Amino acid sequence: MNQDEIAALIAAKNAGLPLQDAGASATTPDEFGNDYSELDPAIGANGEVPMSMLMDLTLPVAIELGRTTMSVQEILQLGRGSVVQLERLAGEPIDIYVGDRRFAEGEVVVLGENFGVRVTRIVSRTTGAELVG
């Protein structure tokens, strides 16, 4: 802060004006003295990041075929060739997660020698209901 800014603050205080209107900087350094006023202007005034800046992010995607619960004894008895029965019925849609959030449902498909998932329904992030799209 220079001498002129200090004088403007004192004059504003004496006149009862808000201090920011007296020529003070609109941004103030944080507790460590860092001033972030020169950062990326692409970020909006409300702090929202434009979608174009997020397009190259990679997120973990998990496909959940089903779940079950087992006792410790049952787990210890598992071996090569054991079959674990899931709570989901054959032919039921499987869940697709992005991060830890359920994003969609789908069905298992075979692509050459690999498995894949055909998306059959996108799920709303707020209600869990199907999104039309």
Image: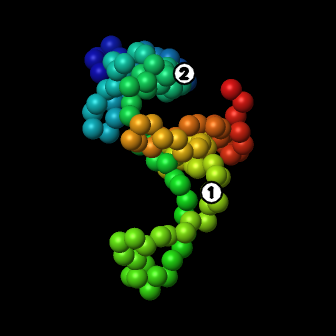
Instruction: Give the vertical position of 77 relative to 51 (above or below).
Output: below
Question: Could you tell me which quadrant the N terminus lies in?
Answer: top left
Closer to the camera, 17 or 30? 30
Identify which residue is drawn at 56% across, 37% down: 118
How was the colour assigned to the protein in this rendering?
rainbow
Instruction: Give the vertical position of 2 relative to 31 (above or below).
Output: above
Identify which residue is drawn at 71% across, 39% down: 130
- Name the spot of residue 95 as percent of width and height, x first: 57, 49
Residue 90 badge: 1
- Name the spot of residue 59 as percent of width and height, x first: 41, 38
- Name the spot of residue 13 as percent of width and height, x first: 48, 25
Question: Could you tell me which quadrant the C terminus lies in?
Answer: top right
Please identify the quarter of the rendering in which residue 90 is found: bottom right
Label located before the other in sequence (2 or 1): 2
Q: How many marks?
A: 2
Q: Residues within 10 Å of mark 2 (few under 14, many from 20)?
A: few
Residue 66 badge: none
Identify which residue is drawn at 43% across, 24% down: 55
Closer to the camera, 78 or 124? 78
Residue bearing the label numbered 2: 17
In space, the residues marked 2 and 1 are separated at their CA atoms by 72 Å
Residue 14 seen anywhere in this rendered image of the structure? no
Identify the secondary structure beneath mark 1: loop
Identify which residue is drawn at 43% across, 73% down: 82
Instruction: Give the vertical position of 8 relative to 124 (above or below).
Output: above
Q: Amino acid at mark 1?
A: Ala
Identify the secondary structure beneath mark 2: loop
